Amino acid sequence: MKICTVIGQVVSNSKHPLLEGQKIMVMKAEGEDGGLQVAVDGVQAGVGCKVIVAQSGAAGAELTGVEWPLFRSVIVGIVDEEA
């Protein structure tokens, strides 16, 4: 799992049927330089939110109900505050 900050949302006029109704968010991982990543939003996070991202097929399967989902990264929680 990773802690990331949501910096945007992917906009598309067509999606695979399994992604219909799902938000795809753009994130930057905390403590990592460089690249961005995308994840399907399982918790209705918004831009600016600090989130927990699971990177496993099991998280994608749970969200879609499909045994072999099209994606691995899923936002599974929002960090309210850090201790």
Image (cartoon, rainbow, N blue to C red):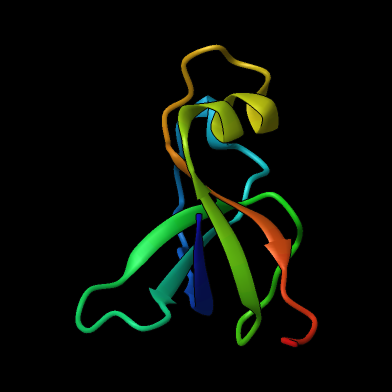
How many circles with numbers are drawn on the protein?
A: 0
Camera-side residue: 59 or 83? 83
Query: Looking at the figure, which quarter contains the C terminus?
Result: bottom right
Q: Residue at x 72, y 86 (%)?
A: 82
Looking at this view, name the residue that lies furthest to the top: 67
Residue 11 against residue 81 in the figure, above or below:
above
From the top left corner, tell me how far across and down residue 7 is, in percent. Answer: 48, 82
Q: Is residue 70 left or right of residue 20?
A: left
Q: Is residue 52 above or below residue 57?
A: below
**Quarter where residue 10 is shown:** bottom left
Residue 75 position by quadrant? bottom right
User: Residue 38 sits in which quadrant?
Assistant: bottom left
Q: Return the x and y of residue 70 as percentages of the image width and height.
A: 42, 28
Looking at the image, the residue that sits furthest to the front is 83
Q: In the image, is residue 66 above or below residue 15? A: above
Residue at 61% x, 87% y: name it.
Answer: 48
Judging depth in this view, the residue of 46 and 53 nearest the camera is: 53
Of the pair 53 and 37, the residue shown nearer to us: 53
**Where is residue 60 drawn, in percent x and y?**
56, 32
Instruction: Give me the residue at 56% from left, 27% from top.
Output: 58
Image coordinates for residue 9, horizontal then vertical, percent: 51, 70
Left or right, residue 47 beside residue 78: left
In the picture provided, is 12 more to the left or to the right than 62?
left
Q: Residue at x 47, y 35 (%)?
A: 56
Farthest residue toward the left? 34
Residue 72, relative to residue 44: is it above or below? Answer: above
